[in-house]
Image (cartoon, grey):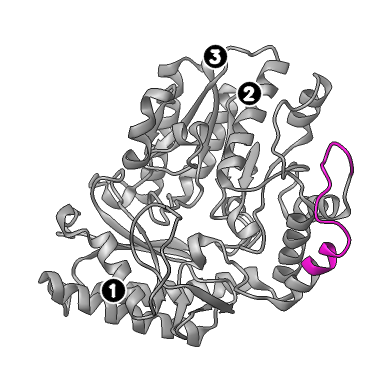
Amino acid sequence: MTSAPSYLFYQSRNPRPFLDRGEGIYLFDEDGKRYIDGSSGAMVSNIGHSNQRVLAKIKAQMDKATFGYRLHFRTHPSEDLAAKTVAMTPDGLDRVFFVSGGSEAVESAVKLARQYAITQGQGERYKVISRFPSYHGCTLGALDLTGYAPLREPFSPMMRGMPKIGAPATYLDRSNLSEEQLGLKYAELLRDRILEEGPQSVLAFVMEPVGGASTGALVAPDSYYGRVREICDEFGVLLIYDEVMTGAGRTGKFLAAEHWGITPDIVAMSKGFGAGYAPLGAIIAGARLVEPVLDAGGFQHGFTYAGNPLACSAGLAVLEEMEEQKLIENAARMGDVLMAELQTLMDQYPFIGDVRGKGLLTAFEFVADRTTMEPLNPKLNAYDRLVELAYARGLIIYSRRTRGGTAGDHFLVAPPLIITEDQVHELMAILRDALDAFAAEVGLPVGCAA
């Protein structure tokens, strides 16, 4: 159908149809075509689309009040959601600050860390170490922590340039080390960088416990997580977990940190926290950080819509739905099914070099050579082309460049946590069809992988 001219602009000119409605894991355009939401949007729609119980609770709040500024009123939705969030997170994380999105959450986490350090007489601490590649947001503060060249480089003169260490991409590591040794090797990069920067100047280390868009569901060896916690404790560096993508059940636990028994000092959440029903995010921290900041005059930070009663009523309804429908448990079960299916792709497509992830945050990566893990020629634009071929067939997946944003191709498969086993198979059938089409288009081999 012919569309009227658009006055919007986003990241590209890729034409897209008008969305008509969503139902469960499916989206429908105005022509009636159905799409499997194989990436939950941008890893957002954790409980699926158009959940009527959630919508009813949002509408009930709309009938009472749609906005109450947090400095003027307490609201039951914000207090109840804060209490629910604390009850679902590890002990020691008992203070919540609401925001509207992931970039805001990361900015808030860093600002809380900084203000806490000042209350402790450690004003010289300001450096926040992060990893390369990584993604922590597009606001300037969060972007300075992000390790993804195309997003960051245009704005680099406007930022301080926070220190980076290598992400634990052990699947690319050709050293003859065990998994445990590899985890420790990459964790020690943090200790080395803290010493290089001067421990007295390092405020925090921020990491995605399971990689997001920039590393494609990267999971470090188990030994990595505990060692990083030890290193932060050794130098008094705050550990911030960016769980914007991994939180709210995506990996089969409420927080991905729970897989390794880690309690970060601060957690940033968004995306699945509001599950697409309202813009919502949060930071969760311990009273030991928050109370000194409040005692010193308050948290010098905030956003107009922080704690918005509509958004918080949506978030509370989402968490209740996750509990009642046991969606976190389903994410773990269906994650195993999906991972097994994705692993079989490596038998059929020699250009898939790695499959990884946890729960329903999974990814696969294209390579030119599995032995060397050399990426495909960037001129193929594989990361974009496969997405378009899948979209044309009614499957939405999410992609980025793997190697810092300039080369490599990975694809995130992260459907809503409500997905069933039959729907996983339905998703995979479309994905295989798209992979066949891509291989034929660029002349890549298909069949028994060597």
Mark sitting on residue 389: 1
Whether label 1 touches label 3, CB < 8 Å? no
Mark 1 or 2, nearer chain start = 2
Name which residue type carries label 2.
Arg
Q: Looking at this view, is 75 or 289 the one in front? A: 75
Quarter of the figure that contains the C terminus:
bottom left
Element at badge 3?
helix
Q: Looking at this view, is 351 or 401 the one in front? A: 401
Does 63 appear in magenta? yes
Indicate the position of residue 218 as horizontal and vertical percent values: 41, 53
Quadrant in which residue 184 is drawn: top left
Q: Residues within 10 Å of mark 3 (few under 14, many from 20)?
A: some
Element at badge 1?
helix
Q: Which residues are magenta?
A: 58-73
Indicate the position of residue 96 as horizontal and vertical percent values: 75, 43
Q: Nearer the viewer, mark 1 or mark 3?
A: 1
For label 2, the residue is 114
Calculate the distance from the C-alpha at mark 1 to the C-alpha at mark 2. Answer: 45 Å
